[in-house]
Amino acid sequence: MTVQERAASRLAVREQRETNLWADAFRRLIRNRAALVGGLIVLGLILTAIFAPQLAPMHYAEGDSYNAQTVPSWLVPFLPIKNIQSYAKINNNFIFGSDELGRDILSRIIYGTRVSLPVGFMGALTALIIGLVYGCISGYYGGKVDNIMMRIVDIMYAFPTMLLIILLMAFFKSTFAQVQEPGTIAYTFNQINKVVDRFLGLQGGGMLFIFMGIGLTAWMGMARLARGQILSLKEKEFIEAAHTVGAGDLRIIVRHILPNILGPCIVAETLAIPGYINYEVFLSFIGLGVDAPTPSWGSMISEGSRSIRSYPHMILFPALALSITMFAFNFLGDGLRDALDPRMRGTS
Amino acid sequence: MLRYIVRRILWMIPVLLFISIVTFALSHAVPGGPFDREKKLPPEVVANLEKYYGLDKPLYQQYLNYIGNIVTKFDFGPSMRQRGRTVNEIFAAHLPISAQLGVLALLVALIIGIPLGIVAALKQNTFWDYLGMGVAVFGVSVPNIVLGPLLIWIFALALGWFPVAGWGKPSQMVLPAIALGLGSSAIIGRLTRASMLQVIREDYIRTARSKGLTERIIMVRHALKNAFIPVATVLGPMFAALTTGTFVVEQIFAIPGMGKYFITSVTNRDYAVVMGTTLLYAVFLVIANLVVDITYAFLDPRIRYT
C-alpha cells in the first residue's frame, strides 16, 4: 500500500464512525492524559462516596478519648516532629491515625466525600439551572427586560460573595435548622433537609442549607455567560428560519438555542466545581458548614490546623484528600473545555 | 479624563448606599441579637442595652443614624459585643496588619504570576510552558486552607527556617504572604499567558517586527503593555479581597488581622461591625476598580474616557 492509500483507508474508517459533537468531544477528552486521570479520580471519588459504609473501617462519629490523637507507626518517620513518640500514643489500629475525639481519620475522610462531592455537583447544577433560565430569558427577550435583569446581576456582583454566603448560612442555621412548628415554611425546609441528609447517609449534616447558600450566590456568572451566548446566537439564520415556520419562543429556546450553548456552560460549571467544594470547606472551617458529627474535610482541616504543632498527622490526610479532589476536577474541567472547543485551548 | 474620574467617584455614593442598605437589612433579618448568651441575660438588662445602643428604635431610624454618624463624624459606631470598643478602633488596630499582609501577598502574586505567564506564552508548548502551567494548576488546586498548613509543615516544623505563626517580624511574614499570594499568582499567570498569546498575533506586533525593532523592545513595549489589560482587571477585586483581611490565612498563622471580624461579627450579630467591615471592603473594591479603569488609558492609548 502506498502512503496515499493508507491515508485514504484511515480516512474511510474515520468517516464510518459516528461523528456528532459529543462523541467527538468524548474521544478528544480520553486522549488527553491529564483529563483522563482527573476523570478516573472523580469516578473513584464518586464510588467512594456511594460505598462509604463498606469501605470505611470504622464508624465516622464514634470514638473514645482513650484513643485520642493516636499516630500510626508507619507515619512516624515522615512527620516533621522528631520526638513525637515521647508524648503521642502510637497505635496501628488507625491507618491514618485518630482525631482529638479518638475517631478514625480514614473513615471520616471516606465519609467526607459524601459532603464534598454533593456540594460540588449540586452547586454546579443549581448554578446551571438558575443561570440558564435567567440568562435565557434576559438574552432572548432583550430590551428593557434584559436591561433590568442584568442590572440586578451587576448589583449582586458588587456584593462581597463571602459576606453574602456567611449571612445566608447564619440565616438558615438560626431560622430553618431549629425544630419548628409543623405547617410553617421553616418546618418544610427542615423536613426536606432531613430527607437530604438521610439520602446521603449522614447524621444531621444540614446539607440542604449549604446547597442553597452556594446555589443562591453562584448563578450570576452562569446567567451572564448564557445571556452573552444567546445574544450572538439569536440573530443567526436558523433561528430566523424557526421563527418563520411558526415555532414558539419556548420551542426555539429549548430546541434550537439551548443545545448550542450548553457546551460552554457545562465547561464553565465543571471548572467551577472546585470552587464550590472550596466554599463548603471554608464554611466548615469557620464553623458555619456541616453540623457535627458529620465529617467534612473543612472541619477536619480546621481541627488539624489548631493542633499542627503537636499532632501534625491530623491535618495531613484531609488536606491531601481535598487537594487531590481539586486537582482532579481542574484537570477534568480543562480537558472538557479543550475537547468541546479546541480553539479555546490554553485560555483561562 | 478628570470629568470621567469625578463622575465615577459620584457614582460610588449610590453604590455604597445600596450595599449598606442591603447589608443592614440582611444582618437584621438574621434572627437573634448581639446580646444572646448561653446563659440568658435578664430581659430588663437586654432592654437597657438595646436602649443604650439605639436598637429599640425603628430600623429605618437606626440606619439613618448610622449613616449620619459616618457622614458627619466619620464614626462607624460602637461594637456591641466587645464592650467599650468602637469599630473605628477595630479598624485602626487590625486593618494595617491585614493591609500589610495583603500587599505582600499581592507582590508575591505579581512577582511569580507575571513572569510565569510571559515565559509560558513566549515558549508555548515547550517544557517551560508546561512547567509554568503546572505551577498554575497547583496554585489553583491547592487552596490556601491547605497551602498554609503545608508551608508550616515543611518550612517551619521540618526545616525550621521560619516561625510557625505570629506577626511582626519580617521572618513571620514570609509564609503567610506566600500562602495567600500563590493562589492569586496562578490566576495571574494563566491570564497573562492567555492574553499574551492573543496579543502577539495582533497586527501591530507584526508591524513592529517589520519596522525592524528588536524582539525585546517589541515584547516589553508593545506586547506586554497590552497583554496586561485583562490582568489589571482582576487586580482590582484581588487587591480589595487580599488587603481587607482573609480569615483562613490569618487564622492558620495566628495573625491579628481584620479577617476574623468579617465572620465573628455575623455570628455574633454585632451589627455595627458587620456594616463596618462590609463597607470597608466595598470602598476598597470601588476605589481599586476605579484605579484599574484609569490605568487602562495608560496601557492602551486606544482607550479614552470622556
Image: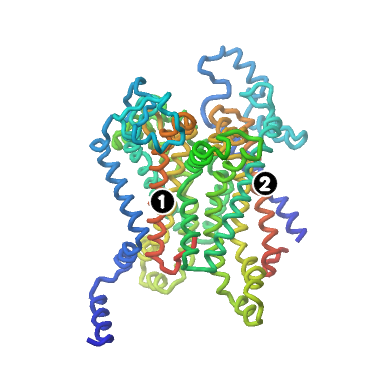
The residue carrying mark 2 is B14
Per the model, the C-alpha gap separating discs 1 and 2 is 41 Å
B170 or A63, nearer to the observer: B170
B128 or B228, nearer to the observer: B128
Structural crowding at the residue carrying mark 1, measured as other residues with C-alpha within 10 Å and reported as few (<14), some (14–19) or many (≥20) = many
Quarter of the image where the N terminus of chain A is located: bottom left
Q: Residue at x 25, y 71 (%)?
A: A18
Structural crowding at the residue carrying mark 2, measured as other residues with C-alpha within 10 Å and reported as few (<14), some (14–19) or many (≥20) = few
Element on which disc 2 rests? helix
The residue carrying mark 1 is A327
Q: Residue at x 59, y 36 (%)?
A: B259
Judging from the image, the colouring scheme is rainbow
| Residue A314 pos. (x, y %) | 41, 33
Q: Amino acid at mark 2?
A: Pro
Q: Amino acid at mark 1?
A: Phe
Tell me if B291 is positioned left or right of B187 in this view. right
Query: Where A32 sits versus A67, above or below?
Result: below
